[in-house]
Image (cartoon, rainbow, N blue to C red):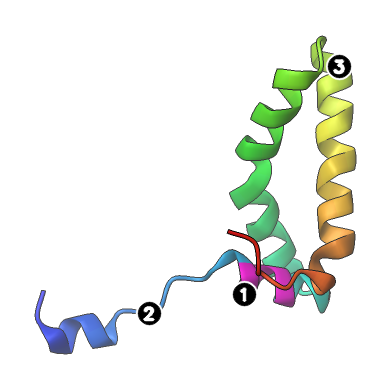
Amino acid sequence: MTVVNAMRQPSPVTDLDLARAAGHEDPAACRALVDRLLERVRTTVRMVVAGDRDADDLVQVSLIAILDAAGAFRGESR
């Protein structure tokens, strides 16, 4: 890829970009953030919780909490 072509490529949307947009109640950003985080949240919850039904409930509650807090996300963690 040439420098010119690279410059035409859109910048990848970061988690911080999505969190900020979701914090402003952008429905597309909320969906994209959930799509991006779903497998990580599901994997983490299933490592801690036995039982698919309980895990699914906790995943849903976790994603709602993430969306509720998205506007406060500063992206400072590493």
Depth order, front residue of 53/72: 72
- Identified by mark 3, the residue type is Arg
- For label 2, the residue is 10
Identify the residue at image location x=66%, y=69%.
Answer: 75
Whichever of labels 2 and 1 marks the residue nearer the N terminus, that label is 2
**Given this view, does label 1 or label 3 mark the residue nearer the observer?**
1
- Identified by mark 2, the residue type is Pro
Magenta span: chief secondary structure: helix
- For label 1, the residue is 17
Whichever of labels 1 and 3 marks the residue nearer the N terminus, that label is 1
Above or below, 72 against 54 in this view is below
Q: Based on the displayed image, in which of its 4 quarters is residue 31 positioned?
A: bottom right
- What secondary structure is marked by label 2? loop
Q: Which residues are magenta?
A: 16-20
- Identified by mark 1, the residue type is Asp
Q: Position of residue 51 (x, y in %)?
A: 82, 10
Exactly how many numbered labels are in the figure?
Answer: 3
Label 3 to label 2: alpha-carbon separation: 40 Å
Identify the residue at image location x=76%, y=74%.
Answer: 26
- For label 3, the residue is 53
- What secondary structure is marked by label 1? helix
